[in-house]
Amino acid sequence: MTPPISDRPSLTSPSAPSGEGASDIDFGFARVPIAEKQGRVAEVFSSVAGSYDIMNDLMSGGVHRLWKGALMDWLAPRSGQKLVDLAGGTGDVALRFLRRGGGSAHIVDINEDMLNAGRKRRDLTSYADRLTWTVASAEDIPIDDNSVDRVTISFGLRNVTDRQAALAEAHRILKPGGRFCCLEFSHITTPALGKIYDLWSFQALPRIGRIVANDEAAYRYLVESIRTFPTQQELADMFSQAGFAQVRVRNLSSGIAAIHSGWKLD
């Protein structure tokens, strides 16, 4: 049963892990043992892999395409650049990077079902020789230090168990002068939109998930995971803690989503 809006975590005060040495972590509004979160997230995305791209359009009214376009504007792909897209799933961000002139893309995701759905995409066929697919966690990336030009993660960081470890890994694999960008659902900056946004998120989206993906619970988790994700400033601070410099934040659609950017300088 959906909790009443007043009982949910505040949009501006997301819940967080219990602290140093904690044994549990957020999984939506629930708390689960840390060791279980990755497996639970994998189950969610295995369930929705076949309809994931369609659901993205339905969930955002197609606006996610504009957000990803803004991400590419910040990345400014160039010939010869190597991208690693973490939690890259069906390859949507990698495709945009290559279409914008990037050199090659390495898609990393813990969920093989999501990667398999991406491999079947016809619009990726012509780029097959410039794409690599790897099943791995963003917290332990099987890529050499100082070896890639750009790293991205889009709508995936909130599903990572140890987000700070994932940021540190992104920093590790980047070359000096490389850039990391995170596109993620965030916290709205226009309070008047709060009630409308809650109604859409908690009432409409799970029902759409039930109809299109036959999995209401998966989309309820995805909605809840947005509310428990760090605020824009909290995530910017995490970037700095991971060693990134010149950290910038760009809110999209009144903060429904946000892009965080940081550079590895040395």
Image (cartoon, helix red, strand yellow):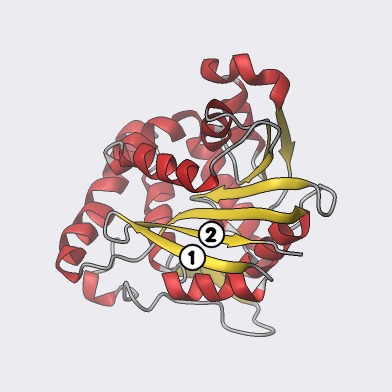
Which labelled disc corresponds to residue 123?
none
Answer few, some or many: residues within 10 Å of disc 2's Cα (few below 14, many 20 plus, some between 14 and 19).
Answer: many
Question: What kind of residue is marked 2?
Answer: Ser
- Which residue is labeled 2 in the image? 261
Q: Quadrant of residue 85?
A: top right
Which part of the image, by quadrant, shows the C terminus?
bottom right
> Residue at image x 54%, y 67%?
247
Of 162 and 144, which appears nearest the observer? 144
Give whichever of discs 1 and 2 has the lower sequence position: 1
Please give left or right for residue 83 compared with residue 158 in the image: right
User: In this view of the protein, can residue 232 be seen by the observer?
Assistant: yes
Q: Position of residue 234 (x, y in %)?
A: 49, 76
Q: Residue at x 39, y 48 (%)?
A: 219
Residue placed furthest toward the right: 144
Q: Amino acid at mark 1?
A: Arg
Q: Position of residue 129 (x, y in %)?
A: 72, 19
Q: CA distance from mark 1 to mark 2?
A: 5 Å
Q: Look at mark 1 in the image and give the residue it sits on.
A: 248
Q: Is residue 265 above or below residue 93?
A: below
Answer with the quarter of the image where residue 216 lies. Answer: top left
